[in-house]
Amino acid sequence: MRTLFEIIEAAKSGEQTTQEELLFAVLALDSLSTFDAMDIRRPAEMGGENSVAYLRYSEHHRRWHTALNASPEVWLGDNVPSNPDYQKLRKVALALLDKVVKKQGEAN
């Protein structure tokens, strides 16, 4: 099986993935999300309602609540691999990232 990163990149590029890869990717991402939520919630609880940590946790919770209560297709909207504009923007973003990585490599 491919790595989680490889599965995500394949899906974003519009490449084929297996049902098993997608199942395990969803489960892995759910676990990561749970860990992240716990890490964000602890400082929010300690800092109180007016803390930056609480505001960040509230926004995190709002985003997840919105996403979990919509179909993935509706929540993603036009941000899908089958959309040519999505692929154009992705290509630009990947080229920019590649440039940054190359520059960092030259600096080291």
Image (tube, helix red, strand yellow):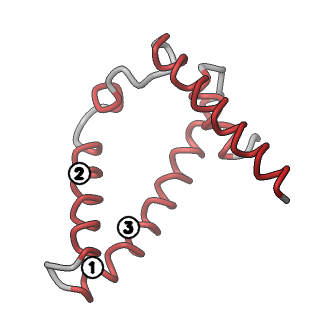
Residue 73 screen position, x and y as percent? 34, 25
- The answer to whether the residues at label 3 and label 1 have Cβ atoms under 8 Å apart is no
Image coords of residue 61 (percent x, y): 25, 59
Tell me whether the residue at label 1 lies in contact with that at label 2, contact meaning CB atoms closer than 8 angstroms.
Answer: no
Crowd around label 1: few <14 · some 14–19 · many ≥20 (10 Å) = many
Please give the residue where the numbered disc 1 appears in the rendered image: 44
83 or 107: nearer the eye? Answer: 107
Looking at the picture, how far across and down is residue 1, in whole percent? 76, 41
Question: Is disc 3 in contact with disc 2, using a CB cutoff of under 8 Å?
Answer: no
**Mark 3: few, some, or many residues within 10 Å (few <14, many ≥20)?**
some
Using the image as rendered, state which of residue 90 and residue 17 is in the foreground: 90
Secondary structure category for the residue under label 3: helix
User: What residue would you read off at disc 3?
Assistant: 37
Marks 3 and 2, how far apart at CA: 12 Å
Residue 25, how many percent across, how many down? 58, 44
Q: Earlier in the sequence, mark 3 or mark 2?
A: 3
At a point 60% along the width and 46% down the height, the residue shown is 24
Location of residue 43 (image quadrant): bottom left
Under circle 2, the secondary element is helix
Kindly identify which residue carries mark 2: 65
Residue occupying the far top of the picture: 84
Given the image, on which type of amino acid does mark 2 rest?
Answer: His
